[in-house]
Amino acid sequence: MLMQTPQLSGSARLAALREELKRRGLDGFVIPISDEHMSEYVGDYAQRLGWLTGFRGSAGFACVTLTHAAIFVDGRYTVQVREQVDADLFEYRSVPKDTLAGWLAEVCENGARIAYDPWLHTWGWVEALEQRLEPKGITLVPEGSNPIDAVWPDRPAPSPAVAVPHDEAVAGRTSADKRAAVADWLVREGHDAVVIPALDSVAWLLNIRGADVPHTPVALSYVIAHKDGSAELFIAPEKVTPELTRHLGNAVTIRDRAAFESALAADFAGKSVALDPDFAVVGIAQGLRAGGASFAFKQDPTILAKAIKNPAEQAGHRDAQARDGAAVSRFLRWLEIEAPKGEVDELSAAARLQAFREEDPGLSDLSFDTISAAAGHAALPHYKVDDDSNILIPPGSIYLVDSGGQYPGGTTDITRTVWIGTPDGSAAPTAEMRDRNTRVLKGHIQLARAVFPQGTSGGQLDVLARQYLWEAGVDYAHGTGHGVGSVLAVHEGPQRIAKPSGGQAGTGQELHAGMILSNEPGYYKPGAFGIRIENLVLVEEREMAGAEGRYLGFETLTFVPLDRKLIARDLLTAEEIAWVDAYHAKVRDVLSPRLTGEDLAWVERETAPL
């Protein structure tokens, strides 16, 4: 939970930052949601944007000048930012329509010096912004220490949690094997070393896990991997145990995380180092350059390897899905009984779902904050319930729950949309609700059933999930699928299923057998209801008689009943009905050994043939 500073109001925090900027001779400062590893989710110590503005979303940034301040978010957070950020202090700006460069040109005078923290931004971000600001006479300045940190009186310290070995039986490959593959890549590419700052890449390469970022089992650290197969792990000494040292072995040198920046400048003179442009921040490149190293931007060689799950990881994921499916199914039965009474709210529903998951001793954490969204809140795809936004789940409404868990063998992510009835059972979904849900389901089925040649990208498959919504003149604004890690990040690249337009990262990535993605089309009617159906799928090879070349398809991994009350059977084809019936039969097969009594009876009822 983000720690707040009760003795400083929002206006006082903004005033304190402006005084600090004046003291440093700066005219403005950019505040992202980011850490030194370009993580999607960050620890409390790095929640600078939240501390300054009160915004608790997972994407966005602000910029503060001596006279103006603005917060920039995309369409997912249009409502949330207005609920959490004081309009008297910050202008609301919407990306991509509004740009930081455009806003700075509006509010800054010629000669303004706008600072940024070089450990929170990539080289590409700086270059692009500099090109746009230079004609306006505005200079972008790397600031050695973050001004927010200077005025945040009770900023949390980074997590002290120890790093732990990840079972090689679950990982499916030894760290030595993975490091050897990276070394081979370095030799082929002509580099001496690669800096790996992405926390999940560090965890995957060394087969370690941690507890430093909420819901993502990683340890704050960096790795420098060398072309001889050795590696250096930069990590705080208090995180290192004798068990970890034994696990890493002699080929991995453990160094203090505080020594990372100086090592960049001291250890690579005359050498060539590879950096991932999406994860290597400006501070890393500056350190290497100061020490006389050359560097080249290339994708971290662990990224694609990590995305292609080996047989052990696939088996672990199937086990995790079975565990999770039992917990979610028990929750949905509980919800069907309790929510119509009108006494269950969004927070208590999320807590009850977590309690069902926690009955499994293997659960180590949720994989992200549960999206527990009732009625109009379900129309916000990335809604995050809190004490201020929490509402009772109205009887006679739609409820959407998007959630997941971290289990010993895998990471789960599932969305179910269900109808909440009334005590007398008289309320029913509207024809529009059933139509939209069924169109979402039809798209979900078409993507799940897709067969495609090797070389196909996620961007090429996206239309399969949208086609029936488009027929009705509607669409959804988010991607259709994201990669998922193996006891790691719930959002993992490089693969993605989304519209190929708009520069969306990952949409052009070729899909490979072994990749895990989500299949989650949706529909959202502002202020009324929202629908999303999400299962995880595994890319697998498909044997086809007469096939010319190699073909792939999807194995569905998630097994929880779909809400029959929201399905308009007459809108489904015979093939689609057969898919639903076969899916529900597999749900029974997977969950029956894990459920008893009324829970099992509920699953059997909900999975009866359409």
Image (spheres, helix red, strand yellow):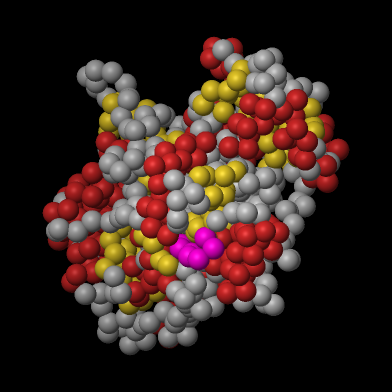
Instruction: Determine whether 335 is above or below 74 in the image.
Output: below
x and y percent of residue 491 in the render? Answer: 49, 46
Q: Which residue is drawn at 50% across and 40% down?
A: 126
Q: In which quarter of the image is residue 218?
A: top right
Magenta stretch mostly in which secondary structure? strand
Q: Residue at x 54, y 26 (%)?
A: 301
Q: Tell me if I can see residue 518 in this picture.
A: no
Q: Tell me if I can see residue 30 in this picture.
A: yes
Q: Which residue is drawn at 53% across and 51% down?
A: 114
Q: Which of 581 and 139 is in front in this view?
A: 139
Label total for image: 0
Q: Which residues are drawn in magenta?
A: 65-74
x and y percent of residue 318 in the render? Answer: 51, 43
Q: Which of 521 and 128 is in front in this view?
A: 128
x and y percent of residue 117 in the render? Answer: 60, 47
Left or right: 465 as drawn, with respect to 309: left
Q: In which quarter of the image is the C terminus?
A: bottom left
x and y percent of residue 577 in the render? Answer: 22, 53
User: Which residue ends up furthest to the right in the rendered image?
Assistant: 242
Q: Which residue is drawn at 42% across and 38% down?
A: 131
